Amino acid sequence: EVQLVQSGAEVKKSGESLKISCKGSGFTFTNYWIAWVRQMPGKGLEWMGIIYPRDSDTRYSPSFHGQVTISADESTSTAYLQWSSLQASDTAMYYCGRRPSLVRELGIDYWGQGTLVTVSS
Amino acid sequence: QSALTQPPSVSGSPGQSVTISCTGTSSDNRVSWYQQPPGTAPQLIIYEVSDRPSGVPHRFSGSKSGNTASLTISGLQAEDEADYYCSSYTGSSVLFGGGTKLTVL
């Protein structure tokens, strides 16, 4: 069974760093792109970026480039999303998802359960 | 980046059909659709304009004309009440539409 299991909810203060995770199982992790999507409270989905764990090819949305870092460890089938200095505006639910292709619109066919990040000022 | 524009809300009664539009897509078949019931993660319901993943009911169908993609839900059911998002790969990144809230009356 394909699963993406994300790390648990986080409560942090402004200025702190954070790294959340997304562990894949039930599929060959290195054959798929892993995407990260933000959903702020009461708002829509926002594409943050995507990584291909086999060669760490990473693409960022212009809106998030320089604001976050996406990485992956193929040995543990885990992708990561990290911040060096959180801001209150980073408060959101963050989803990871599996995408079979970058250029073909096959979509994100499996999603993690989401990680809620709350940042207080 | 160009935006994908969706109506903020649509509604329909059980058994009726509703259509959600997504304007601003490219001329090829790069459109997917997601359903997100309240408090849950999104779920893929349409990819490459009109294909359905296994397990998605045939009541959900997709189409495209020019730069506007459409999601049609036939035979509305109460459990279809959710937010719906279109998405498209632009050649340099992926965009999501702003989302459409479907209310089943």
Image (cartoon, helix red, strand yellow):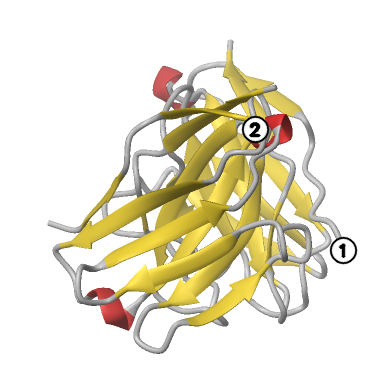
Q: Position of residue A35 (x, y in %)?
A: 49, 62
Q: As shown in the figure, which amino acid type bears the numbered disc 2?
A: Met
Q: Eyeballing the image, is A85 above or below A75?
A: above
Residue flagged by tag 1: what amino acid is it?
Ser
Q: Quadrant of residue B91?
A: bottom right
Foreground mark, 1 or 2, reads 2
Could you say whether the residue bearing mark 1 is in a helix, strand or loop? loop
Looking at the picture, tell me which residue is in the foreground, B105 or B91: B91
Q: Quadrant of residue B6?
A: top right
Helix, strand or loop at mark 2: loop
Q: Residue furthest right?
A: B2
Judging depth in this view, the residue of A83 and A115 nearest the camera is: A83
Residue positioned most to the front: A15
Q: Position of residue B43 (x, y in %)?
A: 42, 45
Q: Is A24 on the left-hand or right-hand side of A39?
A: left
Q: Residues within 10 Å of mark 1 (few under 14, many from 20)?
A: few
- Residue B33 location, x and y as percent? 55, 53
Q: Residue at x 83, y 61 (%)?
A: B24
Badge 2 sits on which subunit? A
- The residue depicted at 66 percent of the width and 32 percent of the height is A14
Q: Quadrant of the N terminus of chain A?
A: bottom left
- Both labels 1 and 2 in a single chain: no
* Chain under disc 1: B
What residue did someone put label 2 on? A40
Residue A103 visible here: yes
| Label placed on residue B2 | 1
Q: Is residue A78 above or below residue B74?
A: below
